Every structure is written in structure tokens, then in C-alpha cells.
Image (tube, grey):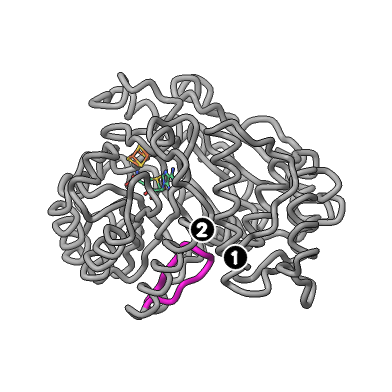
Amino acid sequence: MKNTSELDKSGISDLAIYVNIPFCNSKCHFCHYVADIDSRNLVGQHNWYSEYVEAIKRQILHYLPQLTSDGHQINSIYFGGGTPTALSTEQLIDILQVIESNSKPSLHFGSVTLETTPENAPHHDFRALLDAGFNRISMGVQSMDNNRLRMIGRSHCVEQVQKAIEIFWDAGFTNVNIDMMFGMPSESKEEISHNLEKLVALAGNHYSIYLYEPDPRTVMAKRCESSYTTEDLYSKFDLVLNYMENAGYEGYNCFYYANDNSRCDCDDIYYNLGNDWIGFGAGAHSLLQQCLYRTSSDYKHFIATPLTIGSPIPARENAIYLYMTSTYLLYSDKGLNLNQFERMLGISYQDALAMSKELQLWHEHLTTEGNLVLEGGHWRFRNREDQIRYICHHMERRFKHDILKSQQFAQPYAPLSSK
Ligand SMILES: C[S@@+](CC[C@H](N)C(=O)[O-])C[C@H]1O[C@@H](n2cnc3c(N)ncnc32)[C@H](O)[C@@H]1O
Ligand code: SF4
């Protein structure tokens, strides 16, 4: 990390914290997040868990005082993974307390989120978690159909979802997000509608409804075959959006639905590029003072050498990161703010286009077709229909390139037939 006198010069003061817990009860067939972990070590390895907790605490103690003493204000904390609730209530509180006690006087938390799964919920004291400072729960549900849950390798059933929600409400949590996916292999529109109906009946205040992304590191991707097309995905996306908006949830940033004031500030790490963030734990990423860092995703290696967040790589030199960040921002409601982009990444968007061939092709195609417009220093999609159609198109291209291997990644986008 740069020395502390350099921190002030950029004028960045907000800091988001991400704590990565790369453990799960089992490995779902669609998910690549814990792909690096040997599945033989997934279950019941509590000896590793306590060593892992100690290593994270040491890492936090090493970095956080440097950042907060320079005026960084912590504006959100997110415990994700993996499944953080694979750890015990006490271990989670222990980590949060180390963050809190090393953040003063710059403590200015917005949301403090804890990811969990339905089957983990009964094993925790959620009242104690709330008292300790967690104020938002995010639970992965994925589907409200028991056959589908079995098919995709989940270790919970629909009945456990309802039970878990009751546990959160009873403990006093008022901000609960539920993750779901759609567009999975062989999933019909009827199945999606049925899922949405059951999902809305849970009366959550926030839903993250993700378009399933086939990842080459997972077994489920091989089952998609040729049905994974832009038009098919688009019609499903449209169904989800209309259903949720008719049910009273406002859609934002493509995948999120909120019914009150529950829009989540932690999404801004990616969708707003408004502040630096530091990621603690194995495989966590950080963006600090225009540099990227990544710790080893091998958690045993992390336990042995926790006092590092990796070597700095200037964000402006990483073409893949520039491409990923730009597309993320363009798929957000606010769009890509040119000044903020340059301030956070140390490179203008114009120069980023020259760095990444894929980004350049994408941008040129979208501007020529009139889908992207420049307004008040922001590039953004001219309307939501285009935005969603291009996400589907992007997914189809990734699928053809990564799974079917029938398409070069850096090749021009085809005009969309149904426009
Ligand atoms: C990192 S996971 C952690 C959540 C928690 N471990 C769970 O599964 O309940 C966060 C969310 O990413 C989403 N996700 C994982 N793999 C995905 C994929 N291939 N395509 C789309 N969404 C995915 C799922 O909705 C999941 O709940
Ligand atoms: S979806 Fe969640 S529980 Fe399943 S493997 Fe991924 S991180 Fe673990």
C-alpha cells in the first residue's frame, strides 16, 4: 500500500470494507465463488475456521488503523463469501468488533451486511448479531422450487427459507435481501413466474434477482446448450422486471428490487465507483488510491501470511479490470461518470477505451447504434430496454466464448435482430 502521506492527495475519504469468508456447507453446481477450495475441506473443518478468523483479525489490525487515521470514513461493511455464517456467531462478532474498535474516530457506517444461507440461519443468534452491529442480512435462496434446488446442488429446501426469514424478523432485523437466479438450464417462464409469486409472498424488502451466468469452472454451465440466447434471456428478464414492478418493487441497477428505502449503499462499491474499498481475507480484492490488490485465494496460504493484501497494480494498467468496471458502470442507473472514473482509476475513459480492445468494440458498437448516450458528463444507456437487452446479449457472447468456445471474445457485436 502507498504510504499514508500519499493517501490525502487524492481527496478520497470514504472506505468500504469487504470481509471474505470462503467456506460453504456444500458446493452449488452453478457457483464459482469458492471453486478454489478443495471440496474435501468444505465441511466441518472448524480448526481451519478459527485459524482463518485469527488471520483476518491480524490483517485488519495491520491495515485499518493506517487507513482510518488518514481520515478515511468507513461507509459500509460487507461480510460475504462463500458463506460467512459457516463461522459461528461468536467468530463473526469477534471480527466485526476488531473492525469497529480500529475504526474510531472515523466510524460512519451505513449498512453492515451479513450473507447467509437458509440452512445456516437456525444455528445462529441473530439478536446477538444485530446487537453487535450487523444491520442487514442477505440470504441466498436461488429458487422457490424444491426440484430445482436439488438439481442445482443447494443444501436447503423451500420450507427452510420461510423459517429463516422468521428468525431474522424475530431477532429485529428490518433490512433483509434475498438472492434469486433466473435463466437457468431448462427453466421455463412458468417456473420463473411461480418462483416470483412465492418469493414476493415472503415479503422481503429487497431482492437481488440475478440472471444466471454460466461459468466454465462449474458443472451446470455444460447443461445450457443452445437455449441460452439473447432473445430467450430477454423475454425472461422482461418477465421478472414487470412482475416485480407490478408487485410494488422498484427495479434499479438491473438486478435489484427495493420496496421502501432499502436500496443498498454497498452496491455502490461497484455501481457508483464512489469510494475506495479494502477486502480482508483469502481471495479478497481491494481498490486503494487507484491501485488494485488481491490476496491469495488459497486460504491455507492466507492463514500463513495474513499481513498482506497483495502487491499494488495500477488500475489504469489492467485492461480486464477497466473493461469489467466500465461495463458494470454502464449497466447501472447512474451510468459512467467520466470525472469519477478518472479520479478513482487514474485513467480517463477515453484512454481506457484504447487500453481494452473489447471495451472499444463494445463502446463503438453501442454508440454507433445510438444505444449509449453522453449526458452531463455521464455515459449511459438511452433506455432500460436497451440496457437489459445488451446484458442478455453480453451473456450470450460470454457463453459462446467461454462454454461453447465457438466465438472469439474480441469480435464485433452483431446488431440485435429484434430492435
Ligand atoms: C457469493 S454468493 C453467496 C451467497 C450464499 N453463499 C448463498 O449461496 O446463499 C452470492 C450470490 O451470487 C449469485 N450467484 C452465484 N453464482 C452465480 C451465477 N453463476 N450466476 C448468477 N448468479 C450467481 C447467487 O444468487 C448467490 O446467492
Ligand atoms: S452459491 Fe453460496 S453456498 Fe453455494 S457454493 Fe456459492 S457461495 Fe457457496
Q: Toward which corner of the image does residue 209 lie, by quadrant?
A: bottom left
Residue 231 falls within the magenta-colored stretch: no
Q: Is residue 75 left or right of residue 242?
A: right
Q: Nearer the viewer, residue 182 or 250?
A: 182
The magenta region covers 249-259
Q: Residue furthest front?
A: 417
**Helix, strand or loop at mark 2:** helix
Quadrant occupied by the N terminus: top right
* Separation of marks 1 and 2 at Cα, in angstroms: 8 Å
Which residue is denoted by mark 1 in the rendering? 418
Disc 1 and disc 2 in contact, CB within 8 angstroms:
yes
Residue 317 can be seen in this image: yes
Question: Which residue type does callout 1 highlight?
Answer: Ser
Which residue is at 39% across, 56% downward?
113
The numbered mark at residue 167 is: none
The image quadrant where one finds ligand 2 is: top left
In the rendered image, residue 160, in percent from the top left (x then y), is placed at 15, 51
In the rendered image, residue 9, in percent from the top left (x then y), is placed at 81, 55
Sequence-earlier tag: 1 or 2: 2
The numbered mark at residue 231 is: 2
In the rendered image, residue 282, in percent from the top left (x then y), is placed at 49, 31
Which residue is at 38% across, 54% downward?
182
Q: Nearer the viewer, residue 52 or 103?
A: 52
In the rendered image, residue 123, in percent from the top left (x then y), is placed at 17, 44
In the displayed structure, would residue 206 be above or below residue 160? below
Residue 251 falls within the magenta-colored stretch: yes
CA neighbours of label 1 inside 10 A, class few (<14), some (14 to 19), many (20+):
few
Q: Is residue 125 left or right of residue 252?
A: left
**Helix, strand or loop at mark 1:** loop
Quadrant occupied by the C terminus: bottom right
In the displayed structure, would residue 2 be above or below residue 232? above
Q: Toward which corner of the image does residue 236 lie, by quadrant?
A: bottom left
